[in-house]
Image (cartoon, helix red, strand yellow):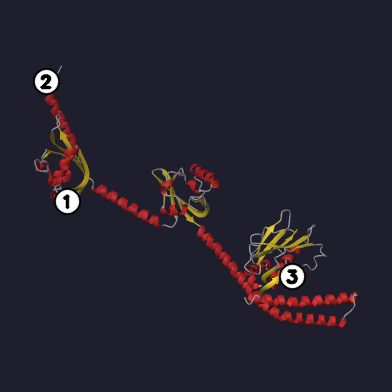
Amino acid sequence: MPSSPETAARRQAVMAEELGLLIDGATNYAIYMLDPQGRVTIWNRGAERIKGWTEAEIIGRNFEIFYTPEDIAAGKPAKDLTRANAESRVEEESWRIRKDGSEFLASVTITALRDDAGALRGFGKVIRDITDHKAAEAAVARREHHLRSILATVPDAMIVMDERGTVASFSAAAERVFGYSEAEVIGRNVSMLMPEADRGAHDDHLKVYLATGVRHVIGSVRSATALRRSGESFPIELAVGEVSIGGERIFTGFIRDMTSRLETDRQMRELQSELLHVSRVSAMGTMASTLAHEINQPLTAIANYLETARDMIGEGDGGLLGEVAEALDLAAAQSLRAGNIVRRLRAFVDGGETGFQVARLDELVGEATSLGLLGAHEAGVTVTMTIAAGLDRVLVDRVQIQQVLVNLIRNAIQSMSGSVRKELTIATAPDRDGWVKVTVADTGIGIDPAVRERLFEAFATTKEDGMGLGLSICRTIIEAHGGRIWAEEVQGGGAVFHFCVPLAGEENA
């Protein structure tokens, strides 16, 4: 049965009343309506609370009263209605005026209202005071900006991750240390920054901690290894902290790249070693000066006595006396040679004239082996010498190079003292252009792993009675010639030592 006009009217009146109650109940929102000319026609209690005017005071007045003087001068009220009419709806944030003249930041929505025929009936406006909200947002933004500014200046990398190990924050320092941008890391597991061998262990530690609460890394500082974007592994110092936010664990890792520090420590150790070496060499220089003075006198006397004995024997014709005379000549020559070596060592340590001159390499090697091989035959050592043709003229300090050869030969003989096969090889061969290589190889015990890495450093030795200076002095001598000295192990036992010296050029002819 159709409703009567009175019933429909009552229903509309009830709906209008309920709508009015709903609008008035929205006290956090200023809800009001304007006619097409911008005059206020409906005003809710939220509008009264927010803006200060009562319904009686505002109904019929133009809405431009709510705008700042600057906006009124710019014609903004009329422009807003024109735009709302054209676009049906306008939303913005702008400043508005209360009855007492104070300003507030408002979230404004203007909606054009039309009848069924599309004719403009007016405008609905919803206003919300967002001053405190925006102030709070601004305060949060300032604090966040302040925090980011602080974190951006912290030299240590900082990584924030959740309890699954997923990266949530990656600082600017972390970008510099690891080589990744923040966008490349966010949302991925932090194990991507670890070497392959450590990734499984990290996930296991995290699972154990979440299950048992037993800490492995958290709350302590430890050394570890990380992985750069380039694939380079590098040492780090790692500290991890934990907080709980909303029931969820958040982990923050602080990573310090230790590459530079460890390199500095290594350089400091090398410098200390060099300083110690210089100190010992300086002491050796003083000792060499004393020895040169003290030993040369008895050596000269020995040489004189030997020559006198030789003269006393006379020119014996062969036989035993001839052999004795020859032995005395050799003994006298070696006595003088010993004194010469001491004097040259002193000059070398003092940094004096080193006596570089053109010498025949075959003669130089022959003289050195005659001294270095003393007792080798009796010890059962077989010696093979191979001197390359066309490499006979070198520019060296003769005595110093012979000192190197004697040292290497004596070391080789000592290393073969307990070997069944005792074979010593001395050879020369071409090296790079303008250089010749000298090789001393043996079948001895080889190079002790304990000193392999620092074989040519001062005081590196495994001999009970050794000072560890021989190979260090050899290196210094060869490097002073512009050459290099190195060692190689031989498959099956033994060692090979090489050094190179410069050939004499045409300008030295």
Q: Quadrant of residue 436?
A: bottom right
Instruction: Count neighbours of disc 2 (C-alpha within 10 A) and say few if under 14, some if 14 to 19, many if 20 or more.
Output: few
Question: What's the residue type where badge 2 is placed?
Answer: Ser
Does any portion of residue 117 appear in the rendered image? yes
Residue placed under numbered mark 2 in the picture:
4
204 over 454 or under it: above or below? above
Residue placed under numbered mark 3 in the picture:
363
The N terminus lies in quadrant: top left
Residue 319's label in the rendered image is: none
Q: Residue 407's x, y, as percent?
A: 72, 67
Please tell me whether mark 1 sits on a helix, a strand or a loop: loop
Q: CA distance from mark 2 to mark 3?
A: 139 Å
Marks 2 and 3 close (CB-CB < 8 Å): no
Residue placed under numbered mark 1 in the picture:
102
Q: CA distance from mark 1 to mark 3?
A: 108 Å
User: Residue at (83%, 75%) from the top-left corner?
Assistant: 327
Total tally of numbered discs in the picture: 3
